[in-house]
Image (tube, rainbow, N blue to C red):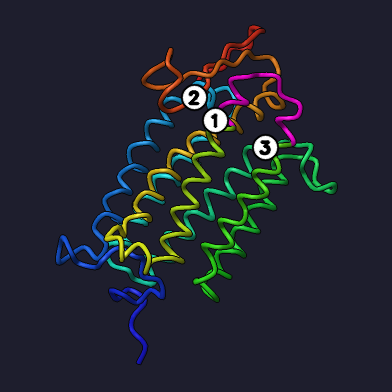
Amino acid sequence: MPPSIFARHSSEIDWCEANYLHSEYVAEYYNTVTNVAFLLVGPLMMYLSHPYACRRSLTVHLVWIMFIMIGLFSMYYHMTLSFFGQLLDEISILWVICLGYAIWLPQPYFPRFIKDRNKFGAAVFLVAVASTLLSFVKPVINAYVLNSITFHILFLLVKELRKCDNRDIINLTFVSFSLWLVAISCWLSDRLFCNFWERLNFSYLHSLWHIFICLAVAHVNTVFAYFDAQYEIPDCTLQLQYWPFKTKKIGLPYLTITMTKDTTKNC
């Protein structure tokens, strides 16, 4: 009889970190605790992006709420290495990506038969539901498929950067790409070259993936928020700021927004 999907080690994937080395209750200790980054960055980015969300749409906060859920589900997954935990982790990532597309994809990139953002959001929702169901069929390939979506995101960034003359945003995009490149290198190296890292007694690259991908998402979401505002809130002036070091351009990026017209909007 196959093990329960809730059972420990029922997942097909076991990352490179040694199991139960630091705790008898936590399978992968460092892979678990590094997810705290999501629990810290998510609420902070909600707070920093609130002025933009008030002008654009409060649904922006859904991205960060699901971002926090990724951290919680990933903690559960690495703590138990259960099949159910793996599915929760990957499905939450899927929904964050779909929310990002629904909210921030510029209208010029909509399919030709869709001209309205609400209709586009409904179409993305249907795709997310179908993809969620399909994720139960072959869950081992889910992570590779989710990571491959990044190439389409990079394509969109390149298209928008060609029209951008804001040096701060161009630099932020470069930093976002660099963080993603380091993150995905850690993910692939831990997954594909575990034996090599075990010989070096360093099996924690997946833990570093959590940190770098967390920072990469915070950076790239700010870039997309900037491009989105150019289309959706044209009567505004945007300035890129960083928390907590505003003047040094170090930390978490966010946008300050000033309306050029008197369009007061309570939030």
Q: How many residues crowd around disc 3 within 10 Å: few (fewer than 14), some, or many (20 or more)?
A: some
| Residue drawn where x is 64% and y is 37% of the image | 104
Answer with left or right where residue 114 lies relative to residue 43.
right
Q: CA distance from mark 3 to mark 2?
A: 17 Å
Query: Which numbered disc covers residue 157?
Result: 3
Q: Amino acid at mark 1?
A: Thr
Residues under numbered marks 1 and 3 in contact, where contact means CB atoms less than 8 Å apart: no
The magenta stretch spans which residues? 159-173
Residues under numbered marks 2 and 1 in contact, where contact means CB atoms less than 8 Å apart: yes
Judge depth for marks 3 and 2 and give the one in front: 3
Q: Which residue in the rendered view is the most extreme toward the right? A: 112
Answer with left or right where residue 29 lies relative to residue 229.
left
Residue 36 is situated, as x and y percent measured from the top left of the image, at 30, 45
Q: Which residue is mark 1?
A: 222
Quadrant in the picture for the N terminus:
bottom left
Answer with left or right where residue 3 lies relative to residue 92.
left
Q: Earlier in the sequence, mark 3 or mark 2?
A: 3
Q: Quadrant of residue 131?
A: bottom right
Q: CA distance from mark 1 to mark 3?
A: 12 Å
Depth order, front residue of 180/253: 180
* Secondary structure state at the residue bearing disc 2: strand
Compared with 99, 237 (above or below) is above
Q: Amino acid at mark 2?
A: Tyr
Q: Which residue is mark 2?
A: 254
Residues under numbered marks 3 and 2 in contact, where contact means CB atoms less than 8 Å apart: no
| Residue drawn where x is 47% and y is 55% of the image | 92
Q: How many residues crowd around disc 2 within 10 Å: few (fewer than 14), some, or many (20 or more)?
A: many
